Amino acid sequence: MTAAMTISLTVNGQTHALEIEPQETLLHVLRARLGLTGTKANCEEGECGACTVLLDGQPVNSCLLLAVRAEGSRIQTIEGVAEDGQLTPLQEAFAAEGAIQCGYCTPGFLLTTAALLSANPHPTDEEITHALSGNICRCTGYTKIVKAIRQAAAKGVRA
Amino acid sequence: MTQEKVIGQRKPRQDVLAKSTGAFVYGMDFQIPGQLYGAILRSPHPHALIRSVDASRAQALAGVEVVLTAKDLPAGLLMPGVVCDQPLLASDRARYHGEPIAAVAAQSADLAQQALGLIVVDYQPLPAIIDAETATADESLLVHEAWETYQAEEGLVRWRNVCCHAALNKGDVERGFASADEIIEGTYTTESVHQSHLEPRVATAVVLPGEVPTVYSNTQLLYWIRTNVAHVLGVPEEQVRIVPTGIGGAFGSKLYPQIEPLTALLSRVAGKAVRMVVPLSDELLAGVPRHPTKTRLKTAVMRDGTLVAQQATMYLDGGAYTGSTPEIASVAVLCLAGPYRTPNVHIDVYGVLTNKTNFGAYRGPGGPYSVFALETHLDEVAARIGMDPLDLRLKNILGEGDEAANGQILTSVGLRETVERATQAIGWREAAATNRGKGISLGWWTTTLQRSTSEALLDANGKVVIRVGTNEMGTGAIMGGVRQVAAETMGLDVDDVLIDVEDTLSGLWDWGSQGSRTLANVGRAAQFACQDLRLKILSLAEKLLETERERLDLAGGEVFSIDNPEEKITLKALAQLSPEGILRSRAESNAEPATYDKSRLTSCLYPAFHHPSYHCHVAEVEVDPGTGMTRVLRYVAAHDIGRAINPTLIEGQIEGGVVQGIGMALMEEVLYDKQGFRTNINWTDYKLPTLADMPEIESIIVEHPTNLGPYGSKGLGESPALHPPAAVANAIGAATGKRFRSLPITPEKIALA
Amino acid sequence: MRPFEYHEPTSIEAASELLAEHGSDAAALAGGTALLIDMRHGELQPRHVVSLWKIPGLGKFHTNGGLRIGALLTVTELGDALRDPATLGLREAARMLGSWQVQNMATIGGNICKASPGADLVPPLLCLDARLSLRSAGSEREVPLDGFLTGPDQTALRPAELLVSILIPQPPPHTGTAFLKIMRRQALDCSIVSVCARVTLEDDGLTCKEARIGLAAVAPNPIRSLRAEVALAGKRLEDATIREAAQLARSEARPITDVRASADYRSHLVGVLLERAIRKAADRAREGKGN
């Protein structure tokens, strides 16, 4: 057996001291130790994007990142997107445009899109495609997701 | 007719707020403190005798609380079904790669995995039966040696490896072939594709002494799960509680009791809660994906394009157990007949058992492979007689009052309108550029009926709560569609209606979120319940306002006098003055099935399409002749859905079905090697379409109302997935001048053709 | 995933010593996008994971004539840093590797050392004559990338040795590269075949002075096609010459049939893609600017 280790993670602006096993992924720590179940789990090999979180503003697959590696970085999950219970314009666009069906991919899409718009407020369709091809949606056919992103971008929404 | 205020509007769904903030609780997010972790040991062989199973080392591992093998189950236990041929755990024989052999419950997921590794199974591998067509031969090895002893539904024609032979016979095909100008033949094959719902299958069971056995499940069909759990626990169904949890996609996969019965048994033995998640590798190994098929088609046609006769033979590979193959076989019969007038039709669909996972219901089961075969074949027919594929179809399609191949008479038929509008939108008659081509597919599909039950109640705040017995699986049928139906009926805005999905102790029996039935049937039950609740409200208001009920109306959350609108009472005030407490009404929908000509069908468990929907898809593709890469440039889908309750949700169903169909057309396939081993059990090797693979989809809504669903709506969920394989294949055919008769049409197949 | 002990050395020497101490029980952690999958599947079960992320300087990108690229530069950072026509092929490979999420985690060093048959970055790096700076506690050496990969998941790294940086000599003037990759779908996929071509033109803008051809997923590791390179060098880039080079490359490829594609299709693709890549690289060499 290996020793547990103590790490400190800053998630959605809040710092947590945690005792973990080294093999725990960020996904596991978020869901099982911090109860932040908005970050979704499935393929565990970077193929679905459901577990996407932002690490220092950049989207990563939290299933492929050891939690200990996220120490010292800013982690943002879906729970940290809305402010004071107020949906961001991007969340509103997803809800209004029908970009959400089963919703299991939605947190990942919202976070990847937030990172995209934050770096590039008016992306071309090609840039949207490059940014979001790592997020699989099985319900919507993507059409309404792209429409929601375009709509949010047109409004000058950053995230 | 009153002007509707909510129906037809793009109202937000009840669940999108929670789904956009991460607060929504899916099955995967549900846990019970102190739960154990379940896991399943699966056969590493496609076909093997099981000589012995030794679980003693697993049992001895600290932290392992239960190990179940076939020996621990009631002797001869077989699961309920059309044919009762499936054990819960394999006992003497493993019939497919991935079949459950043993189950464990342990104090952690890691321990459960370790325990699986300690179970020693002595297998004697046997040759696997892989090809469905050859498995029908009398000399073939048997998947089930005791097939004759199984209990089976009456009227089912079955023998040896054929678990169902569904057939349709209309007119005289031989005479038709003898009289025709041209006869065209072709063979078409499709591979299995997997639902690949983004959320895994997960169940948590709490079966403790003296308590109601309870299973939390992300199923689409609570009451079928209940039947299966009650069966293995040996208790009456009414005493089992199946609790719905949030569903992250299902597409038919979550109809099946893949884990709930086992998890319930583990919990009962452990005396603790047990949670079981199916990891993606197991899901892709041993889920319930779409049937692989092989279809031979032979069509007789006159030079003017009149279809004279059509013969079809399909081998529908059912995998190791009968499951839902018989119903699906009969749906395939109706899809192979297609929405055409062909006077002489003979169709045979053989559901065949092989040593593969049990294939089943995936969005439009029976549909996409049949439509692919028929619609690409029709393009070949058109080519032979030098006719535009569109014109061939327009000449032969069914219209209002026509009789379909099974003898059912069709009404509210919007087929021609879907064809005309879709082809117009894509500019069908315009010539395509080099390496580009357009393809068409059209068809009909059913709105599954059966019982739905709903309860409407007026709560103390004057809001309406709609209680239903089946869960929202993502489409919006429940949290969007049913809510809008209830709001319209009650004269409220959607914000004043709350949908509540109930567990099975509620008695709100429902045939589930499946079969394109949800909004039409659950919505209809809710509408009936609301109509009755409305009467109760008006009766009470009659007393309170001292105005005759006939002179009262309900709208905007108020009951008011038609003659003097100042005389009114809010629903909230009324609810609080109700002498009998909360007003509630329960209603059920159990609509009459379509009638058909019984003499034409044999062994068809799903013999007619109820309140059919009609659709036409057209695709334009560009093919890179060097690499074989196909890009879908444009995609137009027109659907006659009776009445649009919420256009945004309808477009969402169309677009989502199209992406799955394009996946089936171009990249997805559940692969088996020649020995029957599964070879692509992760999403690295099983390919799902990404955003980069998708065109923007144009949805066209056509409304020919029917008298089933609320406000005239027909089913929708499945039909969008029927056509992309055929439409894309036909477009590739037009772009390349070559015919592709097997799916998926990978770049490799195109480049090396 | 089997439990392990996690180490975060702060110098190359300390990392090297850990790797030396634990030998085959240790794994070096870069981006982790491949390592974690291998560990989860049980294909690797290290008892010690040595993170390289606390070692200063491994994520830097230097331009000084040529390029010196730290092994921990992420694929996103790599793609963003490249603008020159001579390195556009490498940028294209970076932009097509996995998804944006994976590109944000995976590193150039990891993509090389994973030594997979389809490693996307390797064909362009081979075309750019990349050299590798390898260090251990007691030694330092520089080797060409060509020859460093010795089989699937195998490299010429000595025990306790680390890939520290990748060196790309300054490409000659009039050089262009182009990378093409075919997958079953349009994104987020392993290559069925990928190719990279580098063309350096004479001042006449027509004659190929020197060429490099890199191929992936057609052999146990990405390879160069020396015959194709020779066939192009000193020739005017006419259709027949390009076609001949592509066919020679095809003859050097040794593809296999697997779950993704057949050997025949892979072989076919080498020919088709390489013709296109050579033309595209030559166009870039002529234009002498990025896109």
Image: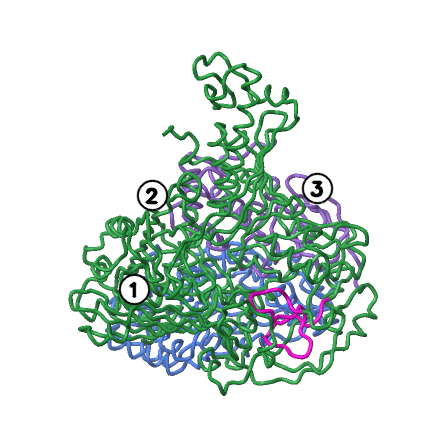
Chain colours: A purple, B green, C blue
Q: Position of residue C44 (x, y in %)?
A: 66, 71
Q: Position of residue B509 (x, y in %)?
A: 59, 48
Disc 1: which residue:
B730
Q: Chain of mark 3?
A: A
Instruction: Check whether the beta carbons of the residues at disc 2 and disc 3 lie within 8 A of each other.
Output: no
Using the rendered view, name the quadrant where residue C262 is placed. bottom left
Where are the magenta residues, as a range?
B78-103
Disc 3: which residue:
A15
Q: Position of residue B617 (x, y in %)?
A: 32, 55
Task: Tell me whether marks 3 and 1 sit on the same chain.
Answer: no
Q: Amino acid at mark 2?
A: Glu
Dot label at residue B703: 2
Q: Residue at x 40, y 78 (%)?
A: C225
**Up-down relation of residue B100 to residue C106 (above or below):** below
Disc 2 element: loop
Local crowd size for mark 1, using a 10 Å CA cut-off: few (<14), some (14–19), many (≥20): many
Q: Position of residue C57 (x, y in %)?
A: 60, 56
Q: Identify the image quadrant of the C terminus of chain B.
A: bottom left
